[in-house]
Amino acid sequence: MSLPVRITGVGRYLPARMLTNTDLARIVDTAHEWIVTRTGIHERRIAADDETSSTMGAEAAREALASARLDPTGVDLVVTGTCTPDGMFPSTATRIQHAIGARRAAAFDVNAACTGFLSALSVGAQSIAAGTAERVVVVGSETMSRIVDWTDRTTCVLFGDGAGAVVLERAAPGEPGGVGALLLRSDGSQADAIYATGPCTPTAAALSAAALSAEAHIVMDGQAVFRAAVTALSESASDALARAGLTVDDVALCVPHQANIRILQAMARSLGLPMQRVVVNLDRTGNISSTSIPVALAEASDAGRLRPGDQVLLAAFGGGLACGAMVVEWSGVRAPAAPSAAAAGRRAET
Ligand code: UT7
């Protein structure tokens, strides 16, 4: 079943500072060739000292509202997928809600690590379907650079910072648009395969010695996550298509979470989906966790890769181990994303 919900606006924000593989080779024992061959990543963006998940999220949300031609006072709900909030509380969504002037909106965060945007999208779409909201801003925003262990070459080469957002509105009967399948899963038995410590981490050796550090940082068993990612992404995508009554031939474009090009190629092989129909931007962004999908979606929309009526397959996987997939019937945004002044300025610098 597909919910009568349209994506009417898209937005994204990537910080100006770029960190290349060559830059990383000056910090840890690594090489551009190794990173490209094993991950497909060439560079990633790193937040400036005064940027946070809420400031970047607000930039992306403003761009999405401009693209939807919507006044922020008409927004009923701001949901943010993030695993790198500005603080323990209040929610990052609350700060975004204030920054964009959505003064009538409720606001809260969803933390499902890299599956955070899909989880937030599910909440937003169901709020509209249930009649508790008419217009929702769904944001994915991450400052992964603040929880990366910059001495650990097995993880620090993977992640980047940034934000993406969409505006959801009710689709009138007969209008194109729909959010369907809404498949979300998790396997908590593998929660320690990838996790980040933080201020509330147990101080007993409940996790590992690494967890005893006061500073939050990512701990990962890369190979275990890689194997689980291929299976979970392929199964969720294929189950979501079945739930939506579609086959892979119906998919105009697949917008997956951007973790590793080898994971995306394995998923595509398993689904029988040509890579030409898979959006890949991780070469320029690295893994931005819950931000990956909305940024890739906004780029695909701006590049004219999506047409009204297209079936778009979204699929994500990450810490939890949480995964999910959804099928969006593209309705076409109201206007191509008009970069906000700050975002435009930062892009001009790059
Ligand atoms: O959003 C979900 C989050 N996480 C993921 O999706 C990560 C999933 N996992 C992966 O993407 C891959 O497992 C990695 C990219 C993390 C690692 O690739 P791999 O092909 O699984 O490499 P590996 O762990 O088997 O390591 C191979 C070698 C090791 O050296 P030895 O033991 O063979 O001598 C590593 O120490 O590569 C070494 N290595 C590196 N060498 C240069 C690990 N990291 C690096 C590095 N530069 N950055």
Image (spheres, rainbow, N blue to C red):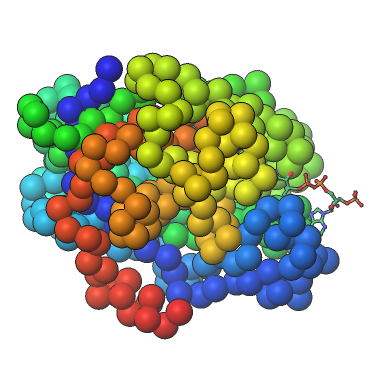
Q: Residue furthest bottom?
A: 349
Q: Residue at x 59, y 22 (%)?
A: 187
Residue placed most toward the observer, 328 or 319 = 328
Quarter of the rendering occupied by the C terminus = bottom left
Q: Is residue 122 above or below residue 113?
A: above
Report x, y in % for residue 43: 60, 67
Residue placed most toward the observer, 318 or 233 = 233
Q: What number of labels is visible? A: 0
Report x, y in % for residue 88: 44, 46
- Give the quarter of the image for residue 125: top left
Q: In the displayed structure, does residue 165 sit left or right of residue 37?
A: left
Q: Residue at x 63, y 48 (%)?
A: 260
Q: Residue at x 56, y 31 (%)?
A: 272
Quarter of the rendering occupied by the N terminus = top left
Q: In the displayed structure, does residue 287 sit left or right of residue 106?
A: right
Report x, y in % for residue 179: 28, 30
Residue 198 appears in view: no
Residue 293 appears in view: yes
Q: Is residue 224 above or below residue 277?
A: above
Q: Is residue 5 above or below residue 215?
A: above
Q: In the displayed structure, does residue 146 sit left or right of residue 251?
A: right
Report x, y in % for residue 268: 57, 36
- Give the quarter of the image for residue 123: top left
